[in-house]
Amino acid sequence: ANIRELNRTLDWNLPTDGPKTINGLVLEYLESIPDPGVSLRIDHYVIEVIQTADNAIRTVRLRQIQPVFEAEQS
């Protein structure tokens, strides 16, 4: 999936200064093709690899997580 399309469609802010696809983004961060079940966090997004085949990532589950703000102490 194209990162810019996902950002536009879902009003997300995945990084667009490097790879243009989710597959490329995962490969850039992990530097290898991961096994199914591997997850990684990029900013406020979790990407879970669901299926790989033919030396490529075929299916991922992508979700946005809410940032956690630590309460300021008075």
Image: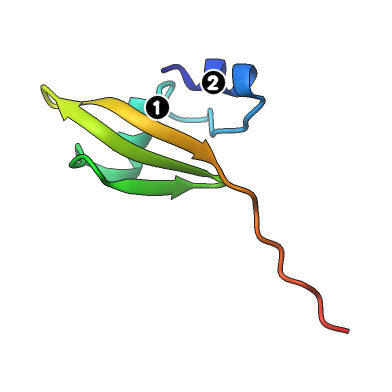
Which residue corresponds to the image point at 34% horizontal and 36% vertical from the top-left? Answer: 26
Which residue corresponds to the image point at 45% horizontal and 30% vertical from the top-left? Answer: 18
**Which part of the image, by quadrant, shows the N terminus?**
top left
Circle 1 sits on which residue?
22
Left or right placement of residue 2 versus residue 4 in this view: left
Q: CA distance from mark 1 to mark 2?
A: 9 Å
Left or right placement of residue 43 versus residue 40 in this view: right
Mark 1: few/some/many CA within 10 Å (<14, 14-19, 20+): many
**Mark with earlier residue (1, 2):** 2
Residue 72: percent from the left, percent from the top?
81, 75
* Res 54 visible: yes
**Which part of the image, by quadrant, shows the C terminus?**
bottom right
Q: Are marks 1 and 2 in contact (CB under 8 Å)?
A: yes
Q: Amino acid at mark 2?
A: Leu
Residue 60: percent from the left, percent from the top?
34, 31
Q: Amino acid at mark 1?
A: Ile
Residue 40: percent from the left, percent from the top?
38, 48
The colour mode here is: rainbow
Mark 2: few/some/many CA within 10 Å (<14, 14-19, 20+): some
Which residue corresponds to the image point at 10% horizontal and 22% vertical from the top-left? Answer: 54
Residue 71: percent from the left, percent from the top?
77, 72
Circle 2 sits on which residue?
6
Q: Which mark is residue 56?
A: none
Residue 45 vs 5, above or below: the answer is below
